[in-house]
Amino acid sequence: MQRFVTVDLGNTNVSAMLWHSGRGRLLFTLETAQIGRSFSAELKRQKLADVRAAVVASVAPGADARVRGDLSRALLNNNKNGSVYFFPRDLDGGLRVRPRPAGAVGADRLANALGALSLTKKRPRSTHAIVVDAGTAVTVDVVSYKKIFEGGMIAPGARLGARALFEHTEKLPLVAFERPRSAIGRSTETAIAAGLWHGFRGLVRECVRAALAEFPSSEIFVAGGDGAACMEGSELKYTYCPELTHRGLAFAYLEHRRHER
């Protein structure tokens, strides 16, 4: 089975994963701001022999041309038939998008939806998957087992909230999103830490509960850098998959290849 690469180009980080025989291996993760200096160099360091294609989900269009060019050069060095696809423009995995305009829905949200469908156990009476991604932004989306992306919710992520407090006030410090020792802070820093931790965890869980109220026959899938932290300890049953976006891109590419035959 051929090898291919998936790239998740996000607002904060870009990551690449190599796929072969249905299994993915993380190649590297970089800050998106460092793409110009490091992306090409990282690709050259990888063993990409016999890699035929790359599939990219991007929410940072300013970096698209650079990523496409670097990937094209890396693939063409190994395979003259190498191709770079952008999801969902070049291949969509058969996913139908209900929100309008469909082209305005983030590629990462749609890839996550496909990733969830690739993992779903389709329990009896389950009809939908609820997909939680907690990173720069918090997204809670719903996709049906019939491959219909229903839509979802978008809110600022915890780290974005922390930076907003820091940048839009004169005295509040920048505080990391991490579990505080106490719910009641005894200093400005610990008060912000407690507010971020409990506030954003509550935000994510309330969004999930609201989605469940409308789509009660749903499985829950969680991704994103802060996804596990936000859902940990809740009474909600969920599957955590940090590489969910990559899984969705792999699913879309394999569907594309299947229809090519």
Image (tube, rainbow, N blue to C red):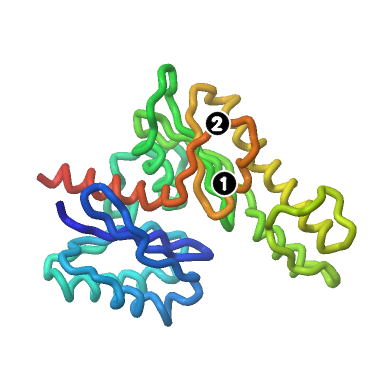
Residue depicted at 38% across the width and 43% down the height: 115
The kind of residue tagged 2 is Lys
Q: Is residue 105 visible?
A: no
x 37%, y 42%: residue:
114
Most foreground residue, 85 or 121 = 121
Name above or below for residue 252 compared with residue 6. Answer: above
Spatial CA distance of label 1 from label 2 is 12 Å
Answer with left or right where residue 223 lies relative to residue 259.
right
Percent of width and height locating residue 254: 23, 47
Res. 228 mark: 1
Q: Mark 1 belongs to which amino acid?
A: Ala
Q: Using the rendered view, name the quadrant where residue 46 is placed.
A: bottom left
Image quadrant in which the C terminus is located? top left
Residue 229 image offset from top left, x and y in percent: 61, 48
Report the disc number at residue 87: none
Residue 237 — which label? Answer: 2
Where is residue 169 drawn, in percent x and y? 82, 68
